[in-house]
Amino acid sequence: MAEVIVITPVKNSLQTTLDTARAIASSSVQVKHIIFNDFSTEETKAGLEANEVGIGYELIHLEDHTDHPSPNYKLVLQMAQKIAIEEGLPLLVIESDVVVKPETIADLLNFQSVNEKSGLVGSVTVDENGIVNFPYLKFKGIKESVIDTHRSLSFCCTLFSAEFLKAYDFMGLDEAKDWYDTFISKKSIELGFKNHVLMNSPVWHRPHASRPWKQLKYSNPLKYYFLKFWKGWDKI
């Protein structure tokens, strides 16, 4: 019996996605893992289909549900919330550039189970050397094992409690945005929940591996902000 619904939105980057899926499949707790394919290339689509049974995830092609161009994070969250509520389970987002440890999901579930009014709880992200990296650089150097924070959580690896899912309907998410990490983090606090980051349960993050153009933010910021504002990409 699954203890949590785990979702991974995917836009290409097949190899990192399969790394993510294999790590989730090796978790110490049973999960229901759903990969949402957001209009990837035919090569990626075929690769996801070929590995579905062997690794053990459920694959949903968003092209079967919408003709809206990628990114479709709002639709993914809405579909996932409906599934989680129907099954009475919390919802965990693990993005396709993240690799969890076997105990990561258990750590998140155990923390939330003993912390009343937990809304969101995330794992801190680190690089291949175990050093805190984007998007949690703001917490680099903090010695506490758990952070109670009002600052926004990234959805790299973040668990939404079943109680929060019932309290806020994702159908109300702003259609003008592409990403909802900041908004949902604030909504959790607004509704009286608490948000935490587990510094003692890190996950390996390869930033923007699934959307290489966003790496321009660091290598060529002028080009990044041109694309962001001129083309209307990456709206948060």
Image: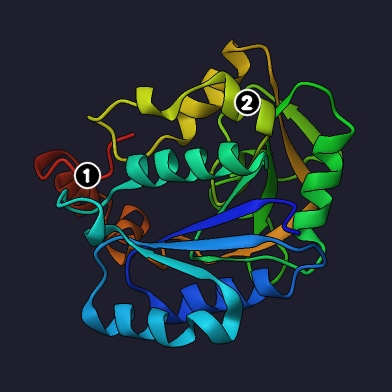
Q: Are marks 2 and 1 in contact (CB under 8 Å)?
A: no
Left or right position of 75 against 148? left
Q: Can residue 121 be seen here?
A: yes
Look at mark 1 in the image and give the residue it sits on. Answer: 225
| Amino acid type at mark 1 | Tyr
Q: Position of residue 60 (x, y in %)?
A: 38, 63
Q: Position of residue 33 (x, y in %)?
A: 58, 62
Figure quadrant of the C terminus: top left
Q: Can residue 151 be seen here?
A: no
Q: Which mark is residue 199?
A: none
Q: Residue placed at 77% from the left, 47% from the top?
A: 108
Left or right position of 80 against 138? left
Look at mark 2 in the image and give the residue it sits on. Answer: 164
Q: Nearer the viewer, residue 61 or 73?
A: 61
Mark 1 closeness class: few <14, some 14–19, many ≥20 residues within 10 Å: some
Give the SS element for disc 1.
helix
Q: Position of residue 51 (x, y in %)?
A: 48, 85
| Amino acid type at mark 2 | Phe
